[in-house]
Image (cartoon, coloured by chain):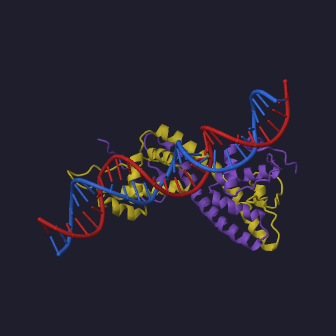
Chain colours: A purple, B yellow, C blue, D red
Amino acid sequence: MLESYTIGALARQAGVNVETIRYYQRRGLIGEPRRPPGGIRRYGETHAERLRFIRQAQALGFNLEEVKELLALEDGQHCREAERLGAIKLAAVRERLGQLRRVERALAALVGQCHSNAGRVRCPLMAALGAGRTINSRKQSSDG
Amino acid sequence: MLESYTIGALARQAGVNVETIRYYQRRGLIGEPRRPPGGIRRYGETHAERLRFIRQAQALGFNLEEVKELLALEDGQHCREAERLGAIKLAAVRERLGQLRRVERALAALVGQCHSNAGRVRCPLMAALGAGRTINSRKQSSDG
DNA sequence: CTTAAGACCGTACTCGACTACGGAGTCAAT
DNA sequence: ATTGACTCCGTAGTCGAGTACGGTCTTAAG
């Protein structure tokens, strides 16, 4: 634990903006090391990892509040609570996963169909995404 | 195709705000039916479906621009283009899917571990999300 | 010591996606 | 004809997640 990065170095290392780090600190997602008398804060690997974690979690659709909870799990002693939160997130993730799978299938079908069927899109995507029937709405635009 | 909803009814039916519909129209995601001489626009099932489509796609992480493209695929005659776009989206979806699967696994592991291990969280989530090592940073908070 | 890069900090701006507001017009019921 | 709910429309405000700005302070190099 060398605590060797300045905030700028940390930012570079993690591929985020300095301002973003400071923003996360304000939001309580990463703690700021106390600054040595009159000086400049130093950050270590743990911070870098935390940043990576945050970005990953975000990329998966968790918002900062949720990420914060996730991080609390990680830090937490409260296994009971961790389990509860984890289970909730897990359910959410599985739901997302299910939908995404349907989309994948539909999209794959669309592309395949397109391939074999040049000229006519019947769009299985629409079917997959909640609508029951074929649409073919001929782009009822206005702008006139 | 009864074109029987007013915008308010459509909104209720689709579970969105009237303003949201108008916003989507401005953004070009749904066309507005021309208004009968001096009157009020009427919407039909196609609009309702389109709204559902939008919400679903959004829930899966597509932004409005992307949704618009998706909708263009649907509307489009241009199969060639549809295929191209579709393939791109498909790749994105698969990437997401892969990540999400990893998270699911990790989260499931976390919850399971928690269960069998009451009192101590080692957090496989962290491992899954880009960090290599166990963290256990004891919440280096600041806040005075 | 001077200087320049960068830290520190508060405040303000941006961007996407809405959401609210206010005034004028429409329409069905009374 | 009047009322009240609702539409239409433009403009403005909100919220989440940053990003930028500007002034002061630290710190390393010359």
**Front in this rendered view, residue B135 or A89:** B135
- Res. A16 visible in picture: no
Q: Is residue A72 left or right of residue B78?
A: right
Q: Nearer the viewer, residue A117 or B2?
A: B2
Report the residue at 81% width, 53% height from top. A46
> Percent x, y for residue A131?
44, 59
Q: Is residue B123 above or below residue A23?
A: below
Q: Height in image: B69 above or below A131?
A: above
Task: Tell me the residue at 77%/57% (across/down).
Answer: B126
**x and y, in percent, of residue A26 in the image:** 67, 55
Nearer-the-camera pick, A71 or B12: A71
Which image quadrant is residue C30 in?
bottom left
Q: Measuring 79% from the left and 45% from the top, which residue is drawn there?
A: A40
Q: Quadrant of residue B140?
A: bottom right
Where is the C terminus of chain A found, in terms of image quarters?
Answer: top left
Task: Say above or below: C1 vs B71.
Answer: above
